[in-house]
Amino acid sequence: MLPMEFVDSHTAGEPTRVILSGGPDLGSGPLSERLRRLATEHDAFRSAVIHEPRGSDVLVGALLLEPQDRECAAGVIYFNNTGYLGMCGHGTIGLVATLAYLGRLGTGQHRIETPVGTVRATLHDNAEISIENVPSYRFRNRVQVLVPGVGAVCGDVAWGGNWFFLVEGAPVDITPANSDKLTEYAWSIRRALQQQKITGAEGAEIDHIEISEPSADADSRNFVLCPGKAYDRSPCGTGTSAKLACLAADGKLAPGQIWRQEGILGTAFTGSYRLQDSSGGRIVPSITGRAYVTAKGYLLLQPEDPFRDGIRI
Ligand code: PYC
């Protein structure tokens, strides 16, 4: 494998590693087809980039690709310590900050192709970045799941580019000091959802758990557990989109109204939505945040390295 050129950034505390070159050849088909090829034929690439010793469980990777639609500024596939993400909000903000840092994007609006659809991103003069996410919606309302050792937990199932189970009310305050307890709580909900076969549309696995509580400094504070048991350091772009879809469905947030979503570190995204043209209850969420570039370099994969493809546990 060739050296892989990368840029690291963080968005509201959550890291993104953009692979600029040296990734596998996935052809030039639709992003969903290239994702299928990446997952089935080149999963060692994901593992080498994300797992120790080069990465960590909390890192989200972003493979930069030529878009199929030439109107788009870039194509991208996101991945993490356990697999692949349809879309990633903090990752898209990190991707735009990275491309701006490299001089490949200027201020203004850009389109980015992902495996679950095209998203719009705007780089503002003040370096903030807004993304207009894929259409989002609440799939099921007030679903009860019986969680062993906890009892009945009620939540909504919503799509924000990934599948979320959203619970109002946390068992302990949402602070970094409580991250272990929050992780165990959210993980037990995730397992119970699997066991009780509670899914998203068409049987899709709900692989993100979002716990919210009121906040003094924002409209809400959340803890989001990602598929590989790492928690999102940011307020989670797709999670905030799913939350906006639930608020819209409950009539608690009007189109255009601002929602400030804080994450576990106290960093915040600003969200709002418009109704999708042909509606059916779907909204188009906009999420605004800021990312900072932290590193640039090459990942090297020496053939004789026993951990060339990362340490898979
Ligand atoms: O910001 O959408 C997001 C996200 C998903 C997983 C981690 N971050």
Image (cartoon, rainbow, N blue to C red):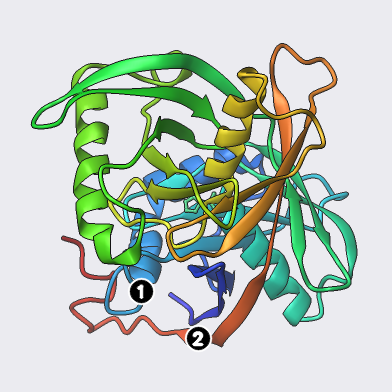
Q: Where is residue 29? Give x, y as percent.
A: 66, 42
Residue 181: horizontal and vertical position, in percent?
20, 53
Three-letter code for the amino acid on which mark 2 is drawn: Tyr
Looking at the picture, tell me which residue is in the foreground, 104 or 145. Answer: 145
Give SS at disc 1.
loop
Image quadrant occupied by the C terminus: bottom left
Q: Residue at coordinates 66% horizontally, 61% vertically from top-left?
A: 93
For this rendering, which residue is in front, 48 or 261? 261
Q: Could you tell me which residue is drawn at 47 percent across and 14 percent down?
A: 140
Image vertical order of residue 222 relative to residue 158, above or below = below
Which image quarter: residue 7?
Answer: bottom right
Image coordinates for residue 244, horizontal then vertical, percent: 63, 34
Mark 2 sits on what residue? Answer: 298
Residue wearing tag 1: 55
Question: Where's the N terminus, which quadrant?
Answer: bottom left
**Of all residues shown, which one is farthest toward the top?**
280
Task: Tell me if 227 is positioned left or right of 246 in this view.
Answer: left
Q: Is residue 250 visible?
A: yes
